[in-house]
């Protein structure tokens, strides 16, 4: 936990950006009956019945000090899918960075081994040399600022039925563009000192 909090106190350095990464899913559902549009005195009406239509997998990369995010909407979330997103982060999103600090949880695909599954060993090693992995602790995913972005996306973009992965991709792309256009970076105020006071019960008890 303290390692993650220390990362968030680093000064802004374009050569060493901090990127928070997280994944989630969105159940795609189709309407079985056409919704009724709103009318004077009546809200829009939707039938309770729906048809399941697969799952969209969302991988979000968020650089809080740059106020930048990218969201990939994929058909799966296997190791090679994650590796492709990380390669884009290194080669296209931050090509001038000397090292990217990637904050994420301990999902079994979030490792250097996934890069070796996706790419030849020399390329995987080249990518790894430009990455620093910092993992949130077990049950501590709330420390990942990418979760804040997913929370906003859920409220502003995906809080309704979306029929398929293509529609999710369009909605998320519009949300991302609008969100990136805003100039306000994140303000993270929970520090290591706060953690030692408010979460003291989680620290090991040392005998005198």
Image (cartoon, rainbow, N blue to C red):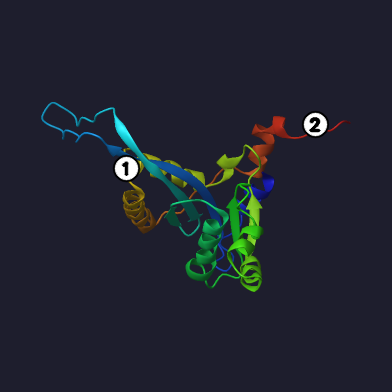
Q: How crowded is mark 1: few (under 14 residues within 10 Å), some or many (20 or more)?
A: some
Q: In which quarter of the image is residue 99?
A: bottom right
Look at the image and tell me in which quarter the C terminus lies: top right
Query: Can the viewer see residue 70?
Result: yes
Q: In which quarter of the image is residue 151?
A: top left
Dot label at residue 162: 1
Q: Furthest-right residue in view?
A: 208
Dot label at residue 15: none
Disc 1 vs disc 2: Cβ atoms closer than 8 Å? no
133 relative to 37 in the view: left or right: right
Q: How crowded is mark 2: few (under 14 residues within 10 Å), some or many (20 or more)?
A: few
Percent position of residue 185, x then y: 46, 54
Query: Can the viewer see residue 63?
Result: no
Q: Is residue 161 above or below residue 110?
A: above
Q: Is residue 158 above or below residue 40?
A: below
Q: Is mark 2 on a helix, strand or loop?
A: loop
Look at the image and tell me in which quarter the N terminus lies: top right
Residue where numbered disc 2 is placed:
205
Residue at 41% x, 42% y is: 26
Mark 1 / mark 2, whichever is N-terminal: 1
Residue at 19% x, 29% y is: 43
Closer to us: 106 or 195: 106
Percent position of residue 116, x then y: 64, 64
67 relative to 178 in the view: left or right: right
Which mark is in front, 1 or 2?
1
Percent position of residue 14, x then y: 54, 67
Residue at 61% x, 57% y is: 10
Q: How far apart are marks 1 and 2 (CA)?
A: 49 Å
Q: What element carries label 1?
A: loop
Count of numbered badges drawn on the protein: 2
Residue at 47% x, 60% y is: 66
């Amino acid at each position: 936990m303290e390692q993650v909090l220390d990362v968030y106190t680093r000064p802004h350095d374009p050569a060493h950006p901090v990127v928070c990464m997280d994944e989630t899913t969105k159940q795609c559902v189709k309407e079985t009956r056409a919704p009724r549009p709103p009318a004077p005195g009546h809200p829009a009406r939707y039938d309770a019945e729906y048809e399941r239509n697969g799952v969209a997998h969302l991988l979000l990369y968020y650089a809080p000090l740059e106020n930048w995010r990218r969201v990939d909407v994929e058909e799966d979330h296997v190791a090679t899918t994650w590796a492709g997103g990380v390669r884009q982060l290194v080669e296209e999103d931050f090509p001038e960075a000397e090292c990217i600090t990637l904050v994420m949880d301990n999902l079994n695909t979030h490792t250097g081994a996934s890069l070796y599954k996706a790419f030849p060993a020399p390329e995987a090693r080249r990518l790894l040399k430009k990455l620093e992995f910092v993992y949130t602790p077990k049950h501590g995913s709330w420390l990942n600022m990418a979760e804040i972005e997913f929370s906003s996306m859920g409220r502003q973009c995906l809080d309704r039925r979306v029929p398929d992965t293509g529609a999710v991709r369009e909605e998320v792309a519009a949300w991302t563009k609008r969100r990136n256009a805003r100039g306000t970076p994140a303000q993270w105020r929970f520090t290591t000192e706060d953690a030692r006071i408010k979460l003291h019960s989680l620290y090991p008890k040392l005998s005198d």
